[in-house]
Image (cartoon, rainbow, N blue to C red):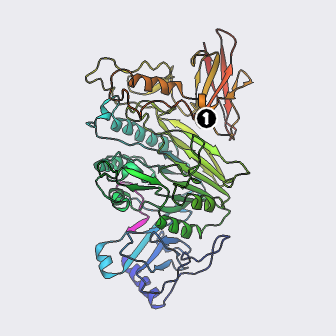
């Protein structure tokens, strides 16, 4: 096959074949991102699908984007002194092959020898998807963020590495139950916590999942010993390839962005501070990539930090401190539908812009930390249990549901203290001897979409419920057939989260009196309540999601 590729490539070069320069989306533009090569062509290559040439596939050097011609050939006049990767925007119906660790190989890494010769020859041989390529499952996680078990804050309650192993196990078992369609994953950054050696443990976890994971660079995935934003990415790039790229699954176009610009901290020179937004280079690439995408397409854009509306109601994309924020916001808003996925804030927040907004086609999905409370790695983060989001796609139909992680294999760390773990008054489940979460005799599963609080829990005569993934396209919850009311943000918080935060800030742990630790008592828009006059009683809370599914839970007091 190697000889066939060389022969075909040489024949194409002899014929001076070049990519078609026609425009694709409603906005026009050229297939090479509006750039006409004028110097020596430095990148040449082919894209195959199951060993057959694929035409019309977008390939990029991280700045320019070109399309393969009918023979699968492409060329780019790239500045190889700046180019790290040549990456292929996987076309719908095809997958990239995995390396031995399960990392998708949609990129060619430019070598020093290729830079010296000023010529890269990149070959991509993709694999056709079996079955219906427009029907698939997407598993979305965020911020596993492990530290070594000897790290200071990792000794407070549960080791983050143990929680990561439980997270991987749960995803692996979810995937094993899906046998009639492809499964893919998005990990929304902070894959490690400033310990570059832990990438290998994460990759070992990936290799067991049974599906391809596309990875996003988080601020804590940058090497704190580096000096610049570009240098900080080196460990991530060594393991996973480019930090911004695109691909297509079914009818959706996926865009992965690096949207935190790292900088040195003044106090110690470490690369731990950052600004929001995207660099000029990424903004240029994003425009070039989207020139090949029709405005009727649904965009799935993923970044570590939220790109749009935040849980406190502020707008990230319109902030003057977000580099190119308004630019990317208005560009993406041209598309028929945009789902913007992010982690970083360790909170769950879903938001749908109204029709009057400049961003009327955009929906926000902020995913809480999959391995639980920051520092303690306790069983929930900002009111949402350890877990992840499972997205089901069938053509243009997209739906999602929360999936709680059912395992807790690690033991509570009681070293040098006598208080033990919190009482967990507000945790609905217990763990059996095997570390499996159960409510009564029933294993915790994806029917668990909300947490109910009896009358009196919040010190008043109201019944409360926290509906984890609620947004304004859901119905409001009902208690015994009566509509509940959304709690005003300035009064809203998760009592389960409060229990944990209060415990660790009270009993002499390292987090005691920490200014940056504690539960927020505002900005929890998934909390609802209803007044209850009876001093004792019981009832059922139901809620219907935007996809027609009804969930229920019982509450008594």
User: Is residue 419 shown above or below 485?
Assistant: above
Residue 413 falls inside the magenta stretch: no
Q: Camera-side residue: 517 or 390?
A: 517
Residue 531, horizontal then vertical, whole percent: 69, 18
Q: Is residue 310 left or right of residue 172?
A: right
User: Is residue 337 shown above or below 411?
Assistant: below
Task: Point out the stretch of residues depicted in magenta.
Answer: 100-108
Query: Residue visible at 40% across and 36% down?
Result: 166
Quadrant of the image occupied by residue 466: top right
Residue 106 falls inside the magenta stretch: yes
Q: Camera-side residue: 552 or 227?
A: 227
Q: Is residue 495 left or right of residue 479?
A: left
Q: Main secondary structure of the magenta part?
A: loop
User: Is residue 508 shown above or below 170?
Assistant: above
Residue 148, horizontal then vertical, whole percent: 28, 40
Location of the C terminus (image quadrant): top right
Quadrant of the image occupied by residue 263: bottom left
Kindly give the residue lying farthest to the top in the view shown. 535
Which residue bears the numbered disc 1?
525
Q: Is residue 475 left or right of residue 322?
A: right
Task: Using a 10 Å C-alpha cutoff, classify the residue at mark 1 as few (fewer than 14 neighbours), some (14 to 19) or many (20 or more).
Answer: many
- Res 319 visible: yes
Location of the N terminus (image quadrant): bottom left
Query: Residue visible at 57% across and 54% down?
Result: 317
Q: Is residue 148 left or right of residue 122?
A: left
């Amino acid at each position: 096959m190697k000889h066939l590729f060389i022969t075909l490539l040489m024949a194409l070069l002899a014929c001076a074949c070049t990519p078609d320069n026609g425009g694709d989306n409603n906005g026009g533009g050229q297939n090479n991102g509006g750039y006409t090569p004028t110097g020596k062509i430095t990148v040449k290559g082919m894209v195959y699908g199951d060993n057959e040439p694929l035409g019309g596939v977008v390939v990029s050097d991280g700045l320019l984007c070109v399309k393969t011609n009918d023979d699968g050939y492409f060329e780019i006049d790239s500045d190889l002194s700046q180019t790290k990767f040549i990456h292929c925007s996987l076309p719908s119906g095809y997958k990239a092959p995995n390396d031995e660790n399960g990392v998708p190989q949609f990129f060619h890494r430019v070598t020093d020898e290729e830079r010296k010769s000023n010529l890269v020859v990149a070959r991509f041989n993709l694999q056709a998807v079996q079955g219906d390529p427009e029907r698939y499952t997407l598993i979305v996680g965020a911020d596993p963020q492990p530290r070594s078990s000897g790290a200071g804050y990792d000794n407070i309650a549960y080791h983050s590495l143990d929680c990561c192993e439980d997270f991987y196990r749960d995803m692996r078992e979810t995937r094993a139950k899906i046998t009639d369609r492809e499964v893919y994953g998005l990990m929304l950054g902070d894959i490690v916590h400033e310990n570059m050696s832990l990438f290998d443990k994460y990759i070992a976890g990936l290799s067991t999942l049974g599906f391809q994971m596309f990875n996003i660079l988080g601020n804590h995935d940058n090497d704190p010993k580096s000096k610049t934003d570009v240098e900080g990415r080196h460990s991530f790039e060594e393991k996973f390839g480019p930090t911004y790229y695109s691909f297509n699954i079914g009818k959706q176009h996926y865009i992965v962005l690096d949207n935190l610009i790292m900088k040195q901290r003044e106090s110690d020179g470490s690369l731990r501070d950052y600004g929001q937004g995207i660099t000029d280079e990424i903004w240029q690439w994003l425009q070039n990539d989207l020139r090949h995408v029709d405005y009727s397409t649904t965009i799935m854009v993923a970044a570590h930090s939220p790109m749009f509306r935040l849980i406190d109601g502020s707008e990230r994309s319109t902030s003057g401190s977000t580099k190119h924020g308004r630019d990317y916001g208005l560009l993406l808003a041209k598309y028929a539908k945009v789902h913007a996925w992010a982690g970083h804030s360790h909170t769950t927040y879903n938001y749908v812009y109204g029709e009057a907004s400049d961003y009327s086609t955009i929906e926000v999905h902020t995913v809480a930390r999959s391995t639980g409370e920051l520092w303690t790695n306790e069983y929930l983060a900002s009111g949402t249990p350890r877990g992840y989001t499972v997205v089901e796609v069938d053509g243009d139909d997209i739906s999602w549901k929360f999936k709680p992680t059912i395992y807790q294999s690690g033991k509570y760390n009681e070293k040098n203290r006598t208080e033990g773990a919190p009482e967990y008054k507000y945790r609905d489940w217990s763990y059996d001897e095997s570390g499996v979460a159960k409510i009564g005799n029933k294993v915790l599963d994806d029917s668990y979409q909300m947490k109910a609080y009896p009358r009196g829990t919040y010190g008043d005569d109201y019944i409360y419920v926290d509906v984890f993934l609620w947004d304004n396209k859901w119905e409001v919850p009902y208690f015994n057939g009566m509509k509940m009311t959304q709690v005003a943000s300035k009064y809203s918080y998760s009592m389960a989260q409060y229990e944990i935060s209060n415990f660790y800030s009270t009993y002499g742990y390292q987090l005691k009196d920490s200014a940056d630790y504690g539960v927020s008592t505002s900005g929890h828009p998934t909390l609802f309540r209803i007044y209850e006059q009876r001093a004792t009683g019981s009832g059922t809370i139901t809620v219907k999601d935007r996809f027609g599914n009804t969930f229920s839970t019982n509450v008594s007091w």
